[in-house]
Amino acid sequence: MATDRFVLLGLAQVRSSWFRDMSRWATTAVVPVEFVKAMSVEELRARLRSGRSFSALIVDEGVVGLDRDLVEQALETGCAVIVVVGDRTRRSWHDLGVSAVLAAGFDRTELLQVLGQVARPIARNVEPTSLDAAAPEPVGFRGQLVAVTGAGGTGKSTISIALAQGLARDPRYSELICLADLALDAEQAMLHAARDVVPGVAELVEAHRSGSPGPHEVRDLTWEVGERGYRLLLGLRRHRDWTAIRPRAFDAALDGLRRGFRTVVADIDDDLEGEAASGSMDIEDRNAMARSAVRNADLVVVVGTPGVKGLHSLLRVIREVIAAGVPGSQVLPVINRAPRGPRARAEIAATLGELLALGGETSVPSPLHLSERHRVEDALRDGHRLPDPWLAPLASSVLSLLERESIDQAAGDHASDELVPVRIEPGTLGSWTEQDEPPAVGAP
């Protein structure tokens, strides 16, 4: 007859007393535990990817590499995460998704009690399985996220600046708008003539690897752009620095950014390929910032240019955004450097609409046209405000779509509360003849 026991995967610092105790308890069978010891975080990750089922990962708080990504990887395999802490621990482990915390010096009773609460026993004759851990729903305020993307040379970084300034024109939202440079070849530092390169997105992600900074701490990692009324999160200092951006930590950093601002405008790349399309996890990790921004965005602004090449690139990016799971109604095409004539603009809109219809994308709004202004380049060079008449249509269109999306979501949340007509079957209301008095209103 098969017996159940807890299969534990463990890692600790050198000479940790609880690590020795766990080995002794498992060897002498005084607790129903099979203890698998690891020598490094890399070995932990390899064992979690092996397909073997583990009840829990029990790890010392001082282990280097114990962060949000390791915790998430364990939880995704159905493995609970238990951290052994000392008397002076200052980290909020539950914010990282840790299942439970044990004080150093715990005994067998405390161990079994925690395992019974957060872990699942594994039968000896059951093949290894993988369970999907349900991610907790985010609670509390989250600002809106607008992702701005487009092919190279379309001016998407300039459009991102214009949108951030346009949204910050309302004095009530001054400095509550954040422009986040999430592109691999980050150019916002150059466009803003930033003299310092830190802090930036790398520091924001690092702060969320093993903690959950508050809104004020997040805002301290951004720079004030006083004349334009928003704050700026600097991007990567070098293209290759994407290797230090771990996906789960970045997801938490983006969520923390939304908790600190009313609206976040994210300047992202147009490459959204992942493992499913390329067969490479390295490509998915490289595009983690753009993929996460699009996946969580309330609205995606796709920038293109007029002409055959410009419309082709615009159409390609729109289709990639929709393929990433964004509804067509949440995609706003923008034609930068558009012709001024209404007839030419109508032809561009009609052509784009026909091409989108061929692929079944009929819910995408009509494109917004922004004409070329020479004063825009001068304002960028001198660090002044962009011309308000030029960016006003962009900000108005984005605000209108965001408001409509909020109304649609609210309507969907209350759809179950609406009254639904009920079919009345003949005879269920009774009957009366002409000789009888009709029943009084409200009478039983």
Image (tube, rainbow, N blue to C red):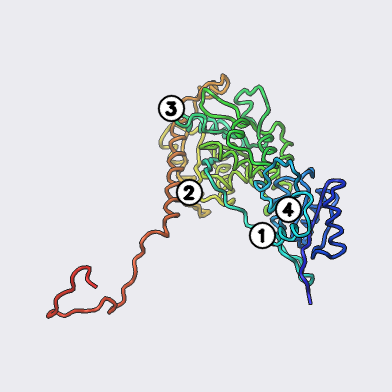
Task: Give the distance between the C-alpha atoms of the residues marked 2 and 4, in whole angstroms.
Answer: 43 Å
> Circle 4 sits on which residue?
82
Which residue type carries mark 3? Pro
> Circle 3 sits on which residue?
389
The tag earlier along the polypeptide, 4 or 1, is: 4
The residue at 82%/52% (across/down) is 18
Location of residue 110 in the rendering, given as x and y in whole percent from the top left corner: 74, 57
Looking at the rendered image, the disc whose residue lies closer to the viewer, 3 or 1, is: 1
Identify whether 119 is placed above or below 217. Answer: below
Q: Secondary structure at mark 1?
A: loop
Label drawn at residue 329:
2
Task: Give the distance between the C-alpha atoms of the residues marked 4 and 3, in whole angstroms.
Answer: 57 Å
Q: Secondary structure at mark 4?
A: strand
Between 130 and 100, the one lying in front of the other is: 100
Compared across the picture, whether 207 is left or right of 227 comes to right
Label drawn at residue 132:
1
The image quadrant of residue 223 is top right
Compared across the picture, whether 182 is left or right of 379 comes to right
Any part of residue 404 in sight: yes
